[in-house]
Image (cartoon, helix red, strand yellow):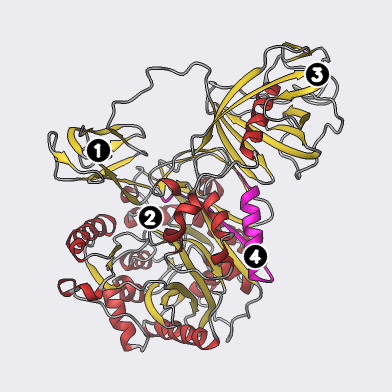
Amino acid sequence: MIRSLLVANRAEIARRVFRTCRDLGIATVAVHSDADAGAPHAGEADAAVRLPGDAPADTYLRGDLLVEAALAAGADAVHPGYGFLSEHADFARAVRGAGLVWVGPPPEAMEAMASKTRAKEIMRKAGVPLLDPIDPAEVTAGDLPVLVKAAAGGGGRGMRVVRELDALPAELDSARAEAASAFGDGEIFVEPYMEGARHVEVQVLADTHGTVWTLGTRDCSLQRRHQKVIEEAPAPGLDGELRRTLAESAANAARAIGYEGAGTVEFLVSPAGRAYFLEMNTRLQVEHPVTEEIHGLDLVALQLRIAEGEPLDPEPPAARGHAVEARLYAEDPARDWRPQTGVLHRLEVAGLRVDAGPADGDAIGVHYDPMLAKVVAVAPTRAEAVRRLAHGLERARIHGPVTNRELLVRALRHPEFEAARMDTGFLERHLPELTAAASDDDGAARLAALAAALADAARRPATTTVAGRLGGWRNVPSQPQLRSYRAEPDGTEHEVRYRLTRDGLLAEDFPEVRLLSAEPGRGTTAGWGTAAGRGTEPTLSAGPKSGAGPRPVTGPGPGADPGQAAAPARVVLDVAGVRRTFEVTAYGDRRYVDTPRGCHVFTALPRFPDPTARTEPGSLLAPMPGTVVRVAEVKAGDRVEAGQPLLWLEAMKMEHRVTAPAAGVLTALHATPGHQVEVGALLAVVTAEE
């Protein structure tokens, strides 16, 4: 029996495993880097062991330190989670060699699948259908497009789609360099790239007594940079014969390598309905919750029981309903999926399963994956599950770095996705429409800016509900109040002009809007439309009157410490006879306006901008904090072309190219490999041609 378990991982998956351990009565041990010292997973465990340093290579990828931590904390088992060392056979051997229980497959099974090229050889012998690789030196124009892939690792790193023969040599070199950097193994291979294919996978569970379960299918076709974004179970639109082929192939793959524990066999499904083996992940998948929801299982609990030697039932429980999962990332899809950093002030999603890594108030840094949470909806039918997930994400309160939330909602509501007509190129094909700035034809953004202005006024200490005086203004016609806000991230500016008179709110461009209430300090509400202030008299209240209870905490206005937050301000407006409620929360100069129809994010602009806040034309600034991993063979004085790569930054487990903004002369280059840079740091200057 396992009595104490160390999770050799961090964030969401560590918290997920700890949750099951608490249910089973198993003590828990966390490990954490210095960057994660205050992370939720470190605080939730019964014990935590520090791994000195911040970078994964110094901490979560140090198998020797992880084994030492387990022994020091008195753990008798290790769960690897996913990523990091979860598929490293040598780490599994080290855990077992220390007398600890390894919650995963045998090292030999992991080793068999560690190289995608060797895995394909084993699968061919087992009769599993697959795509034949192509010798990189023999690729012809007739073979295009092709996919260059790293033989080790995963997560989309070291992968390149090549559509032009002339581009192949450079892409091969680039893939080798990234694979060597990410996995310590520069081996790559080439295979046909299947246009219009779907990514479908089968969850397998195998015990130590010869029983192998296949738990239906999952569709993971919606991907960015070959990394999954939206997953669902079961995979829609597959006929019975194809489902049987997938299940049989997955079971054969598991048996061929003597598999034990939880694993996933991944396939490409062609538009013609033929399945081809892609790879096997010898660990728990990120998307495992959708399988749990429809089968009524706890896959982590099953992993632990298999590790303890317990047998599985002869057959798994049948699937019921449909589940869809969306990965919420701190990234900006409209800007080349650029990772975002900063404080996650608030993450609240009602009515859905949320498996999150960070908690409210945590800082999102550059060292790890940008995934904040997995949000899962389950319902009797696919249409209902998709609708529930889109609705829940739209109403979620997400205050902090820019996320992919809007893209997720739009993708879920896209006609092709709703009709289950998706493939691995879906996001790339539809990216412009999924990331286009939202139209404000209905005035929703301008109305939200008005609510932000009224909320800011309500937060001012001088603001009272005395009939003749509102926030220091005489309740008579006078000059209008002026506030300016910049919408984020698209940069649209909104200028709000309004007055408060005896007859109520007079706001330019809003002749049919009446103010019903604007009150700070009410906290999170139970639901929309439950506003106080049912009357028609406009009020800007600083909080409860004397004797009405504790005074609210009022927050800062523009220019205050960004780390401080005002309590939410509820602004209730009557818009042409329709009552609409807005919750406005301030963090420094940032305003989050949450409504039932989505969230609007603004930056409150100063009345007098700083004229010195400018940069030299052609300056290339670091778009995020990160590490310079490579610099092109260029030097100051060289002529460069528009779009030419100059250097590569690594942040949040991804590489990002920094390119020349225009054709011209590289007049300065301030980056060297290994250089740590902060967001906004000057990397290079390109003087454009006249």
Indicate the quadrant where residue 482 lies. top right
Q: Earlier in the sequence, mark 4 or mark 3?
A: 4
Instruction: Give the mark, 3 or 2, whose residue is nearer the N terminus.
Output: 2
Three-letter code for the amino acid on which mark 2 is drawn:
Leu
According to the picture, the residue beneath numbered tag 3 turns out to be: 465
**Which residue is label 4 attached to?**
385
Horizontal relation, residue 263 to residue 151: left or right: right
Circle 3: element type: loop
The first of marks 2 and 1 along the sequence is: 2
- C-alpha separation, residue under disc 3 versus residue under disc 1: 56 Å
Using a 10 Å C-alpha cutoff, classify the residue at mark 2 as few (fewer than 14 neighbours), some (14 to 19) or many (20 or more): many
Badge 1 is on which residue? Answer: 675
Residue topped by disc 2: 66
Q: Position of residue 478 (x, y in %)?
A: 71, 11
Residue at 49% x, 48% y is 436
Is residue 390 located in the magenta-colored stretch of the structure?
yes
Question: Residue 181 sits in which quadrant?
Answer: bottom left
